[in-house]
Image (cartoon, coloured by chain):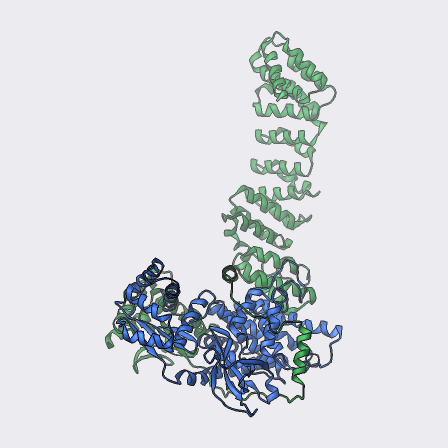
Chain colours: A blue, B green
């Protein structure tokens, strides 16, 4: 059994035990059985592993140094563990060989308590086989504002590769397939290390060169959504490439038409719609028919197919879009709505765009994927500007996994309406600070993307 | 430790060479691989990790060269180095499958394969590696946002009105258990079901909008792959679409001896579905493929499939017998049988002329097939020639077909034969066919003839004549006319036991 599966399985056994002690007496059979299952499993693991360590770092849970991803089949377990560790300000818990049923039950019993009681009880009772390390003051907040240099590098390199790819197609020059393949793999690695980190970079929008940033952003959003539903690495590489290449057919559409400010005539609209078809041809030109290209071709062709059978290009009634096409359909719409363009100078606010997707599930979007997308981005997606009851304006830096409507924000406008490089506030922890409403950052003359670099 | 690492490096060298020479399934590779893995596992059990640095032609462990090979195609170091891999580390818990997978990746032909990506795709749990990328100057600047003087609050109100959504609706994105289950199933299906049918559909749909050279080329490439992997279902779907473009000779690359003879294993494959898909696919072939398809026929083991293949060739030939004519000169009776059968299936006029020389062919099987073919093309006069064939089987078949084809011209001849003494020496099967023919070609006088044969007084050879009475009675029963039944009923009253029994049997058979 791999480290990842073991870590996932143990969280899956801890969750029912922690839940059971919240409801039943600690001598109840439900509690005893859950504890027994946990002990049986970990004893078996101790024959090959010397300790079982869970570390919480920026809303991520690591098991023996391997990050456990939030996937739909372990979402509740991991969210619960993350939430409790966060509330108790625990940095890590380590289970050591020799742990027995009574010890884990006693620990589960105090794990449900508040921070102060937990600390008292933990010190009072002795837990020889459970080691707990607490966060030092300010440690987490400092970590939150630090952005990984590697993630940024990956994003900008990917942007460069995407731009080169499209420009070369525009000008009929040869395309560097190896680079474009490798960059997707880097993005997959980046997503699996720190999905919120790279998601925050999708707030970088480009008014003048919309297509490049948009293509990359759709690739990243698709990867994050794909990872959340549990796709493996190989599938993620296919999905990421498909996301990046979904609009590649636009290289065959006249630029004047793509950037036209006035309403399109019927004929112009029909021409624009052809980009789905052209995408097929462009991918064939660029990549031939390798495994990944086959997925990209399908997505390029289907990414305007709606969940209810409408959309373009026309299709037969029984044909439904592939899973990848349904993912890209959502991510494409979200990024398009939240980006300013010549014909849409004022973009949708991120939380508003999310609501458009939410209210169009079943019609335009796959309802289950729309839910996972909402889980992923939260009610106020990263990059949202929020007016707070303190008179300040906060920028959503990342979402709270366990509280999707209370994100972590950075104060960017102070009470006097001046720009500020203020403190980071976890709205789930600072309950007195409340959201008044989302707002446009342009009102305050700020570009959210600047805060993520 | 040094010695142990050297042994592992040596094990890698040997296993890699064996893999390149013999492939993964060969016992020689296993002989080198197993000790290599065991040494590695022992080492990892003891030290928990083993890291190597990769240089152009060398592999180093702690700055000490443990492997050197300067021949590019044979060098593990070079293969890894050229794709940017600079460090590989094996960790405790390494499984044999992981190491095998690692060996498989590094032994892939170098030209088009990217080893770094290959290793990445394996998603190893106990092998880590570091890849260098070309260093590039990355511009971290974010684009400027145009300054717009807009009433954002008003804009937001407009958007809310336009989208008609409830801005304050609560979003609870929890998934129900059945939604999770369905999604997981969806993912598994997506991974299991090949993307190929979807791509074919996409490309063929594309052609509805526009005739694109790239798309057609793409379809042809997929078609080739499908044929190579015996996926005739998808091959057929593509061929069906490409038929709309007659100027594209997409079948040229398949209509040759090498490709068609390569289909031999499909002919006797146990799965009927696959064979039928193959049959459907070759239905798109042109007449040019016939000589090669003919060469396939001797390898077909099952009669039903052989018959199906002959029908397919006849379909491909349409009405043109010229691609088959050459095979009529062949000495091999099996080939002659097949080509005759195909001509029979084709039902074309010139088949009669083409088959004429085979009427007297010394091989019985050939003559039998000629009779069958002449039957198919409705040539009773030709078939009648076989009534004197040395083979009883051929004569019976000819009689049978003459009966079926209603050919009264030989009626008097056959009647004379029946009346002749020598008729009693023929086998029952042949005698029966004579009477079947008479019944099938009956005229108003037949009841009378049969009555005479049935009631004929015989003083000598009664026992031998019994069969004539039986067959006459049966023929009357088959005719079942009022007159015929009257004869049979009259027979029941006869003193001759043979006559009575024959009539009883005929009436019983009729009643059944």
Up-down relation of residue A323 to residue B160 (above or below): above
B398 is higher (above) or lower (below) than B345: above
* In the foreground, B33 or A179: A179
Would you say A126 lies left or right of B224 here?
Answer: left
Left or right of B470, for residue A127: left
Give the image quarter of residue A159: bottom right
Foreground residue, A82 or B265? A82
Residue B267, percent from left and from top: 52, 49
Q: Residue at x 69, y 66 (%)?
A: B209
| B132, A370: nearer the viewer | A370
- Look at the image and tell me whether residue A447 can be seen: yes
Q: How many marks?
A: 0
**Residue A207 percent location from the top left of the image:** 62, 84
Quarter holding the N terminus of chain B is bottom left
Quadrant (top left, top right, bottom left, bottom right) of the C terminus of chain B: top right
Residue A124 appears left or right of A55: left
Q: Is residue A72 above or below residue A424?
A: above
- Residue B461 visible somewhere in the drawing: no
Judging depth in this view, the residue of B324 and A109 nearest the camera is: A109
Res A56 quadrant in image: bottom left
Instruction: Give the residue displayed 63% in from the left and 74% down from the top.
Output: A249
Residue B91 in the image, given as x and y percentages of width and height: 32, 72
| Residue B343 image offset from top left, x and y in percent | 64, 43
């Amino acid at each position: 059994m791999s480290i990842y599966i073991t870590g996932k399985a143990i969280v899956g056994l801890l969750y029912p035990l922690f839940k059971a002690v919240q409801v039943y007496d600690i001598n109840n059979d439900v509690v005893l059985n859950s504890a027994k299952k946990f002990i049986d499993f970990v004893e078996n693991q101790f024959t090959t592993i010397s300790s079982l360590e869970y570390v919480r770092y920026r809303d991520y849970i690591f098991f023996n140094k391997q990050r456990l991803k939030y996937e739909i089949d372990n979402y509740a377990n991991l969210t619960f563990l993350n939430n409790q560790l966060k509330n108790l300000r625990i940095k890590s818990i380590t289970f050591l060989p020799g742990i027995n049923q009574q010890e884990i039950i006693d620990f589960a019993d105090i794990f449900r308590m508040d921070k102060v009681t937990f600390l008292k009880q933990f010190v009072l009772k002795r837990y020889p086989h459970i080691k707990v390390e607490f966060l030092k003051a300010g440690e987490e907040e400092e970590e939150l504002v630090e952005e990984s240099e590697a993630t940024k590098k990956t994003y900008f390199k990917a942007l460069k590769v995407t731009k080169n790819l499209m420009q070369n197609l525009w000008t009929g020059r040869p395309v560097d397939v190896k680079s474009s393949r490798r960059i997707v793999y880097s993005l997959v690695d980046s997503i699996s290390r720190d999905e919120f980190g790279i998601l925050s970079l999708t707030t970088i929008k480009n008014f003048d060169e919309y297509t490049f940033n948009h293509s990359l952003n759709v690739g990243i959003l698709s990867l994050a959504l794909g990872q959340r539903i549990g796709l493996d690495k190989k599938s993620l590489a296919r999905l990421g490439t498909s996301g990046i290449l979904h609009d590649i057919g636009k290289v065959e559409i006249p630029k004047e038409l793509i950037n036209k400010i006035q309403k399109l005539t019927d004929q112009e609209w029909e021409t624009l719609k052809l980009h789905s078809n052209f995408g097929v041809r462009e991918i064939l030109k660029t990549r031939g028919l390798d495994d990944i290209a086959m997925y990209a071709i399908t997505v390029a062709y289907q990414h305007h197919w709606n969940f209810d059978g409408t959309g373009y290009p026309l299709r037969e009634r029984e044909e439904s879009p592939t899973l990848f096409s349904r993912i890209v359909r959502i991510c494409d719409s979200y990024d398009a709505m939240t980006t300013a363009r010549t014909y849409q100078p004022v973009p949708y606010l991120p939380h508003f765009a999310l609501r458009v997707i939410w209210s169009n599930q079943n019609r335009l979007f796959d309802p289950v994927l729309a839910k996972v997308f909402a889980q992923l981005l939260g009610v106020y997606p990263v990059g949202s500007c929020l007016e707070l009851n303190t008179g300040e304006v906060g920028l959503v830096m990342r979402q709270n996994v366990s509280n999707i409507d209370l994100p972590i924000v950075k104060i960017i406008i102070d009470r006097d309406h001046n720009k500020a490089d203020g403190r980071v506030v976890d709205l789930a922890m600072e309950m007195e600070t409340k959201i008044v409403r989302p707002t446009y950052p342009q009102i305050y003359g700020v570009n959210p993307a600047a805060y993520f670099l | 430790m040094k010695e142990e690492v050297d042994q592992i490096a040596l094990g890698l060298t040997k296993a890699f060479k064996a893999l390149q020479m013999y492939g993964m399934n060969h016992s020689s590779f296993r002989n080198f691989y197993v000790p290599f893995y065991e040494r590695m596992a022992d080492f990892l059990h003891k030290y928990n990790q083993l890291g190597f640095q990769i240089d152009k032609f060398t592999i180093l462990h702690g700055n000490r060269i443990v492997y050197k090979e300067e021949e590019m195609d044979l060098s593990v170091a070079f293969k890894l180095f050229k794709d940017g891999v600079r460090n590989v580390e094996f960790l405790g818990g390494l499984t044999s499958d992981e190491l095998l997978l690692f060996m498989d990746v590094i032994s892939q032909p170098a030209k088009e394969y990217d080893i770094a990506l290959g290793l990445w795709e394996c998603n190893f749990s106990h092998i880590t590696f570091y890849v260098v990328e070309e260093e590039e100057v990355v511009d971290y600047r974010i684009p400027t946002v145009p300054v717009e003087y807009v009433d954002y609050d008003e804009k937001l109100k407009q958007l809310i009105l336009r989208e008609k959504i409830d801005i304050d609706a609560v979003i609870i994105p929890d998934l129900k258990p059945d939604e999770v289950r369905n999604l997981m199933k969806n993912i598994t299906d997506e991974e299991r079901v090949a993307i190929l049918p979807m791509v074919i559909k996409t490309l063929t749909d594309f052609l509805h909008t526009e005739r694109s050279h790239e798309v057609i080329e793409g379809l042809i490439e997929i078609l080739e792959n499908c044929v190579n992997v015996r996926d005739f279902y998808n091959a057929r779907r593509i061929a069906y679409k490409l038929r709309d473009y007659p100027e594209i000779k997409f079948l040229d690359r398949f209509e040759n001896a090498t490709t068609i003879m390569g289909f031999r294993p499909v002919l006797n494959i146990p799965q009927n579905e696959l064979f039928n898909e193959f049959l459907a696919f070759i239905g798109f072939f042109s007449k040019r493929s016939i000589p090669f398809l003919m060469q396939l026929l001797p390898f077909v083991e099952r009669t039903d499939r052989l018959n199906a293949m002959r029908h397919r060739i006849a379909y491909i030939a349409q009405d043109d017998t010229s691609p088959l004519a050459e095979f009529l000169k062949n000495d091999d009776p099996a080939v002659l049988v097949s080509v005759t059968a195909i001509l029979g299936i084709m039902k074309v006029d010139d088949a009669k002329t083409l088959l004429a020389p085979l009427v007297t062919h010394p091989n019985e099987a050939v003559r039998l097939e000629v009779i069958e073919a002449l039957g198919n093309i409705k040539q009773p006069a030709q078939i009648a020639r076989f009534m004197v064939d040395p083979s009883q089987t051929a004569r019976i078949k000819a009689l049978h077909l003459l009966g079926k084809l209603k050919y009264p011209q030989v009626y008097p001849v056959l009647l004379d034969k029946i009346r002749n003494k020598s008729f009693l020496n023929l086998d029952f099967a042949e005698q029966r066919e004579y009477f079947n023919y008479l019944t099938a070609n009956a005229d108003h006088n037949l009841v009378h003839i049969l009555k005479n044969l049935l009631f004929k007084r015989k003083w000598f050879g009664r026992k031998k004549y019994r069969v004539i009475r039986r067959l006459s009675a049966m023929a009357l029963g088959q005719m079942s006319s009022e007159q015929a039944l009257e004869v049979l009923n009259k027979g029941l009253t006869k003193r001759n036991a043979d006559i009575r029994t024959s009539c009883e049997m005929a009436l019983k058979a009729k009643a059944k």
